[in-house]
Image (spheres, rainbow, N blue to C red):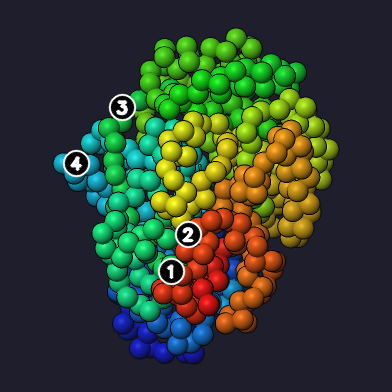
């Protein structure tokens, strides 16, 4: 607490209130991406939904911008607030409880996927989480990933994370603590499944669990750059019959010596023998290194992301691909090489998994925009302690996007947008006159395009639950007139 902050606020909060003179202040601002950190005026490590409600009301009274922090993995600063108030769920709201009979997991709004995977598998279950866990202090959170849609290794079989969400407890802009599910506050439940942090702070998620075998076949297979053509051909063929229980993330990157790395992170929900047979066309190419093996399920999410350290700066962008393209791959490799000496480290990951289950659900059933083909994550890293290089990274990211899109023929606007949770420039609507203190960064069409045909309904629901747009850090929706 500081002298400028009224003691009545700290007295009514059960959790911890951290301000600038607190020994934990600097560590409380830490995010996975250094450039996502902002100097908040106050960070509240909330203990429960009631703490969240009181924090929201306090922020409104004192005209403070609000950010919600789950895992702190968003690179665009969506979970940080310069001179604002951060509602941080990561300290006290990270519990996971499994009801084995009902096959449900009750998960705190600040939990990490690591916690969910480890607890659920004890009962022989799993649900759909992401594909990257990170080292402390910041790991991939359940919160941001889920409200933004969420996909992972099990999406081919079970759909998106939101397709497995049964209920949320959410604190809305008025401070109300609500339960939302298919029969209670249905509009809010619809909106929170893909509408991101636009509607409130989720303090508890309830997920459907599915039977999951204890071990899976997974790991990286590395290919020399000379094998790129064969890899693209084998991938194209493999994709023609892609199954629900397999996936492959192909990463093109540059190592510290400037050498191109091509890694295929394979996953098969079965034994090593089955997995190797399944990826036979890849093995037939002759990999340089093969690290894939049968591993405990709960280790799966920790396989990728070793080079994506905490404390570096990052610029992320998402796009989609309908099919692999050799010409584009060669152009991409050249572009990555060209940039290897600039200090910007780009890595492009092509996430190949069956989209059948995800796209079998009508677009109107949740707020998430579904016409995605295969997701691509373009991730550009630079020294977190050095000068800001966002503008350069943005230009490089656009060049990479153009290369990949050139190899795709006609794509819909939605397909060109890519996955919302991979976006960096989360622009604000220009016509957001009711929140003039916000920094307008771009045309409203960016936010509209993030939700396509679901946008008008989202605007109606925003008007009902957050007419003053106090939740405005992630594709802020403009309330209906
Ligand atoms: C290397 C890398 C790999 C990734 N891989 C995947 C992947 O495989 N699949 C996938 O789906 N995504 C993936 N993502 C994107 C991921 O979904 C986002 O980074 C997401 O923001 C992480 O959630 P978080 O809780 O850690 O985020 P935070 O930074 O804490 O928050 C991000 C946003 O979510 C909101 N939020 C967080 N918690 C809550 C809550 N409890 N209630 C309401 N709003 C909340 C915040 O307000 C903020 O707007 C990846 C990202 C990176 C950088």
Q: Are marks 4 and 1 in contact (CB under 8 Å)?
A: no
Residue 290 x/y as whole percent = 56, 18
Q: Nearer the viewer, mark 3 or mark 2?
A: 2
Check disc 4: other Cα within 10 Å, few if <14, some if 14-19, many if 20+: some
- Nearer the camera: disc 1 or disc 3: 1
Q: Secondary structure at mark 4?
A: loop
Label 2 and label 1: CA atoms lie apart by: 10 Å
Pointer 2: what residue? 195
Q: Is residue 414 left or right of residue 298?
A: right
Marks 2,1: beta carbons within 8 A: yes
Q: Residue at x 51, y 46 (%)?
A: 370
Disc 3 to disc 2, C-alpha distance: 32 Å
For the residues labelled 4 and 2, the Cα–Cα distance comes to 29 Å
Q: Where is 52 relative to 475, above or below?
A: below
* Lower position in the chain sequence, tag 3 or tag 2: 2
The residue at 38%/79% (across/down) is 174
Is 168 rendered above or below residue 340? below
Q: Give the residue number, with chain letter if any, for mark 4.
A: 100
Mark 2 vs 1, N-terminal side: 2
Q: Is mark 2 within 8 Å of ligand 1?
A: no
Numbered badge on residue 427: none
Spot the residue most to the left: 101
Q: Height in image: 303 above or below 193?
A: above
Q: Dot 3, how many residues are within 10 Å of its Cα: few (below 14), some (14-19), or many (20+)?
A: some
Mark number displayed over residue 213: 3
Q: Is residue 17 left or right of residue 315?
A: left
Q: Secondary structure at mark 3?
A: loop
Which residue carries the number 1 mark? 461
> Does the image show residue 463?
yes
Give the CA separation, mark 4 to mark 1.
34 Å
In the image, 355 versus 51, the foreground residue is 355
């Amino acid at each position: 607490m500081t002298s400028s902050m009224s003691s009545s606020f700290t007295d009514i909060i059960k959790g911890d209130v951290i301000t600038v003179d607190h020994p934990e202040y600097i560590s409380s601002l830490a995010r996975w991406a250094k450039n996502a950190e902002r100097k908040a005026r106050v960070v509240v490590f909330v203990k429960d939904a009631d703490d969240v409600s009181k924090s929201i009301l306090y922020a409104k009274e004192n005209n403070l911008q609000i950010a919600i922090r789950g895992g702190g993995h968003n690179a665009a600063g969506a979970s940080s607030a310069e001179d604002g108030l951060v509602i941080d769920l990561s300290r006290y709201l990270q519990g996971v409880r499994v009801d084995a009979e009902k096959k449900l997991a009750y998960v705190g709004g600040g939990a990490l996927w690591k916690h969910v995977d480890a607890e659920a598998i004890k009962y022989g279950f799993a649900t759909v989480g992401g594909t990257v866990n990170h080292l402390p202090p910041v790991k991939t959170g359940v919160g941001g990933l889920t409200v933004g849609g969420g996909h992972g290794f099990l999406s081919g079989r079970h759909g998106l994370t939101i397709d497995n969400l049964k209920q949320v407890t959410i604190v809305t802009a008025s401070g109300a603590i609500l339960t939302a599910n298919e029969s209670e506050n249905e509009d809010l439940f619809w909106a929170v499944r893909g509408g991101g942090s636009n509607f409130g702070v989720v303090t508890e998620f309830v997920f459907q669990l599915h039977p999951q075998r204890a071990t899976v076949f997974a790991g990286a297979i590395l290919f020399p750059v000379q094998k790129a053509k064969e890899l693209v051909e084998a991938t194209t063929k493999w994709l023609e019959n892609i199954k629900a229980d397999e996936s492959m993330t192909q990463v093109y990157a540059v190592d510290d010596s400037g050498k191109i790395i091509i890694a295929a992170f394979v996953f098969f929900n079965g034994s090593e023998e089955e997995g190797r047979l399944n990826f036979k066309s890849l093995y037939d190419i002759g990999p340089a290194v093969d690290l894939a093996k049968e591993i405990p399920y709960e280790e799966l999410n920790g396989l990728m992301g070793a080079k994506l350290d905490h404390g570096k700066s990052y610029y992320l962008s998402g796009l989609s691909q309908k099919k692999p393209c050799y010409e584009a791959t060669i152009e991409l490799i050249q572009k990555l090489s060209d940039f290897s000496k600039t200090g910007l480290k780009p890595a492009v990951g092509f996430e190949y998994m069956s989209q059948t289950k995800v796209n079998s659900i009508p677009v109107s059933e949740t707020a998430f925009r579904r016409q995605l083909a295969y997701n691509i994550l373009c991730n550009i890293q630079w020294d977190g302690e050095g000068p800001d290089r966002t503008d350069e990274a943005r230009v490089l990211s656009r060049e990479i996007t153009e290369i990949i899109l050139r190899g795709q023929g006609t794509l819909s606007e939605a397909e060109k947008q890519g996955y919302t949770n991979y976006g960096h420039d989360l622009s604000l609507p220009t016509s957001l006159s009711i929140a003039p203190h916000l920094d307008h960064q771009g045309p409203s069409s960016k936010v509209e395009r993030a939700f396509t045909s679901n946008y008008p309904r989202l605007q109606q629901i925003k008007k009902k639950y957050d007419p003053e747009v106090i939740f405005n850090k992630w594709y802020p929706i403009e309330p209906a007139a």
